[in-house]
Amino acid sequence: MANEKIGMMTFERLPNEIVLECLEYLSALNIFYSFNQLNNRFDQLIRTIPLYINGEFASKSIFDQFCLRMLLDPTIKRQISSINLSGDPTCYQIRSFLSFVSLDELPSLRSITLTRLEKSDASKFISILPNLPNLRYLHLIEPTNDVKWGSTFLPISNSVESLLPALFHFHSLTHLTLSNCSCFDLSHLLEYAPMLNYVNCHQLSFHSRWSYWFSNFNNHKAVYLKKMSLTGFFAPFEYIEILTKQTPNLTNLTISSIVNTDIVDADRWQSLITSSLPHLKVFKFSFEFLFYDNDVSNIIDKYDHFQNDFWLKEHRWYTEYSYEEDRAKIYTVPLGAFPFILSTQLTTGDYSNTLPKISNKFDNINILTIYHPDVPNKSKYYFPNVKELKLNFCDVEQNQNVPILTGSQYVQSLKSIVNLSHVTYLEVIHNPEIDIVYLLTNIFQEARQLSRLCINSHHISVLLESSPLYKHLKTLRRLWIASYPTCFTNVAVMKKFCRIFSGLEYLSCGVKETNHSLVLLRQLPSLSFLVIEFEIYENRIDSITLENELREMNALFRIEHNVTAWGNGIVSHRTYLRVWKGNVH
């Protein structure tokens, strides 16, 4: 307690300029929870700064306190410049926020990020958009690697189509991010939001109205668009040819594509860039496709077309290729910020005669999946800035020629190719004989920023008996545990788990009994979000008791029952629970 007082006294001695700079790194929710009514000085300071509301993994009680504060002190609304809210897994967080305040009551709002916008909230949101004259940044995101829910959420493609009328002559919008949409809708967005200078689409897909778009293309020019990122392009080459006719001043293009053979056409790209993109300076791409019937030499021949003077001398766009048993990929170097997979079957092509020495080849890779760290030509690979590391042991399980490494050998090989100091998320799946305790202990020692972990359920029983790991496990904030079979065999195990993983704010796991979810909610003091998959059918869920207990906690929650028919008479039943609650202190 004395140290806390000394820390606060030291912070209070800082000049206003330094304090304000520190507050820029905090969400408005945390700022008002920590400093509101602390003293007159901080009361005044926190009411003079732009506020960023980040609802991601926020405690419901802290979230509600801030929203109530806005009602009592409407001047706070004028400070809000950015919001980041979610409809999933945070159980109606968007709806909850909109119940306190309408977005058009926030005159300084410049940036909106919404994850998983529900159908019931979309109409309200769309109707408000034209009344936000200062909005510059709009991001509509769908989460990945999450439990699949029913059809209660509005697909982004439908959102985009619904947004078109609202965006008509939306002259303020300059930055737009979408999880997915069709080329047809993206083309219209470029027309309706003429001031866009940055567009990022995570998945650009084929559209059934392709022929209509082709015949009715109006050739509207998005003259302010300078940068476009299409990190999941799933459409014929004709789409990109038509789309780029709208972007004559594009200077930066990033594109990746999987299982799309006609996109790997150097001559066609050269023609397109020459005719439609004369100002293009930065071009980063990654093209991957399967080749079941083609000889790899034919694939390499296509790649060689990226080695002429147009690519190497005129633009200095250098490429490298790699291939495995049934797939091949060509990419620009240094690589763009694309997910990268490293396996023992990977063979890297040699363009050393045209490729200059590039020491930062993998500097932009933030998401890395490693099937086996002891890869051929290991010295060619080093990833200094990985934030999400996924260790997948498929190579060991599926290929008998791949050596099974001891724990120390695995860690040594891993450290030789990855700088672990930036890793914030770790995923360990398909683990055969690896010593998980040794592996995690060594990774935690290097990865001081690691706060998110995804592991198999059978790992938990081992970790609960590994006392040297306890101090590291307490630092985790988010944990995903493979649901089946559940690692929680009884309440005693669950309580021990809660003591060791006491810092968790988010937990996704499987349980056997209804009351087990309540144990987790009561015993984890910092828990705000719980996602549960029950190992029991719908008619064995004590929904009434569960719902009454959750309401007493003032939690928002959803219980959903899914039935999936897999054929051959096999039917799977899944019951899910999602909870958003306040912390218990």
Image: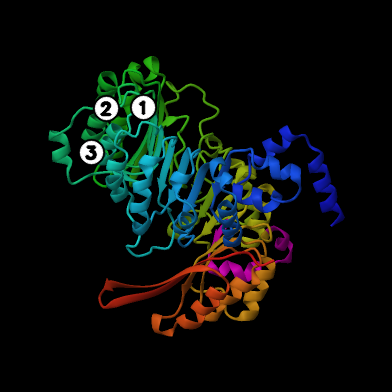
Q: Is residue 271 above or below residue 61?
A: above
What residue is pinned by disc 2? Answer: 246
- Residue under numbered circle 1: 225
Q: Earlier in the sequence, mark 3 or mark 1?
A: 1
Asked if labels 1 and 2 touch by Cβ distance under 8 angstroms, the answer is yes
The 10 Å Cα crowd at callout 2, few under 14, some 14 to 19, many 20 or more, is many
Magenta segment boundaries in residue numbering: 453-472
Residue 106 left/right relative to 123: right
Give the distance between the C-alpha atoms of the residues marked 2 and 3, in whole angstroms. Answer: 17 Å
Q: To which residue does mark 3 refer?
A: 236
Give x and y (percent) for residue 502: 67, 65
Q: Position of residue 25 (x, y in %)?
A: 63, 41
Q: Quadrant of the C terminus?
A: bottom right
Name the residue type under label 2.
Gln
490 left or right of 297 in image: right
Q: The residue under label 1 is which amino acid type?
A: Leu
